[in-house]
Image (tube, rainbow, N blue to C red):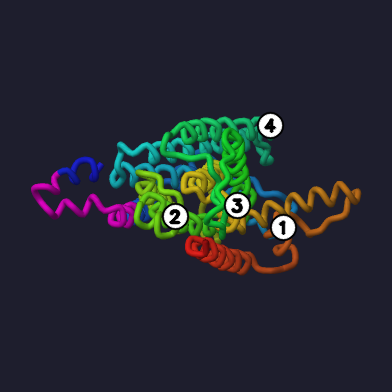
Amino acid sequence: MFYNLLAPLASDWTFFNVFRYITFRSMAAMITALVASILIGPRFIAWLHRIKCGQFIHEDVKTHAAKAGTPTMGGLLVLTTLLFSLLLWTDLSNYYIWQAVLVFTGFGLVGLWDDFSKLRHHKNRGIPGWAKMTGQILVAIVAMCLLYTNPDYSSRLTIPFAKDINPDIGLLYLPFGVFIMVASSNAVNLTDGLDGLAIGPAIVALLVFSIFSYVTGNTRFATYLLVPYIPDVGEVTVFCAALTGAGLGFLWFNTYPAQVFMGDVGSLSIGGTLGYLALLCKQELVLAVVGGLFVIETLSVIFQVGYFRWTGGKRIFRMAPLHHHFELKGVPESKIIIRFWIASILLGLMALSMLKLR
C-alpha cells in the first residue's frame, strides 16, 4: 500500500523514493510482521485457549505428555501478520505476490480443515489422507496453471552446477511442479514434531529464497550469475521477508517450551509456499538442498515404513520421523532442535553457494 500510494510522489519529493527500493521494503516488511506477531501473540494464544484448541499428544513419546493441551493452529498467527505486512509494504499490483498469497492461503485452508477435524474427533484423527492430499493437489494445480501460462515463465529446468544444461520438459512441468509443492508441504508437516523444529529451518529457507527472488528479478544479477531472469519476481523478496518476520514472531512463542503449536494450517502452508518459491525462482532442484532437513525427515519415514513392511515388523529407527528417534535415544529436545537448526543453516549456505558455482 505504501509503495502504491507514496512511490509515485518521489518525482516531487525525493524522500519518497525510498519506497521504490525492494531492499528497504523487505526489511520493513520483516520488522512489521515480527513486531505485529509479538504484540498480538499473547491475545491470540489466549483466544486459542478459550476455544479449546488443545493439541492431542501421542502416547508413544512419553516426554511430550506435559505438552498436552498446548494450543495448536498457531499458523493462523503467521497468516494474519503476513497479510498485514504485505498490505503495507508490497506492490499490490504485482501478479506474483497475489499468487504466493493464493498458495499460502490455499494450503493453509487444507491444514485448517484437518486441524478442526482433529479437534472435533479428538485422538488426533484428522480428515482422511486422500482428502488431505486431494486438497493439496488441487491448490498446487491452480498455482501451476497460473504460473505455466505466464508468458514470462519457462518450463525449462535449472540444473545445479550446469550453466548450459536447461532441458525444456514442456507440459510435464505441470505435474512436476504440483509434485514439488505437495511434497514440500508434507515434508514440513512431518518435521513439525518438536518445539520450533519446523519453523527454524523454514525461516532459513525463506531467507535463501528471498535472495534467489531478488536475483531472479534483477536483470543485471541474473545475467551475471547465469540464472533465468523473470521480470517482476524481485517483488517476491518482500513476500519472503514478510513471511520470515511472521515466522520469527511465531518462533517467539513456539520456542521450547512452546506456548503454541503451528498446526497443519501453518506447516502445510509454509511447506507448499517453499515449493512454489523454488519453482518461481527456477531453483526447483536446489530446493532439495535448501530444505535438506525436511527431505531427511521425510526419507526417514519412507525408509522406516518400507523396511517395516519388507521385514515383517523390524525397524531402522526407534521411531520416525528422525527427530523422534533421537528423543527415544535420550537426547534432550532442546539439543535436537538446535542441532537441526545448525544443519539447516549449513544447507542454506550450500544452496546459496550454488548461485556462483555454475
Residue reaching furthest left? 12
Q: Position of residue 149 (x, y in %)?
A: 47, 31
* Mark toward the start of the polypeptide (4 vs 3): 4
Please, what secondary structure does the residue beneath circle 3 have? loop
Label 3 CA crowd tier, 10 Å (few <14, some 14–19, many 20+):
many
Q: Give the crowd class for mark 2: few <14, some 14-19, many >=20 residues within 10 Å.
A: many
Q: Main secondary structure of the magenta part?
A: helix
Residue 353 seen in this snapshot:
yes
At x 31%, y 41%, the residue is 87
Q: Which residue is mark 3?
A: 192
Tell me which segment is drawn in magenta.
9-29
Extreme residue toward the front, this view: 164
Label pair 4/1, CB-CB below 8 angstroms:
no
How far, Cα to Cα, is label 2 from label 1? 41 Å
Instruction: Tell me the tag on residue 41.
Output: none
Disc nearest the viewer among 3 and 1: 3
Give the labeled residue for mark 4: 130
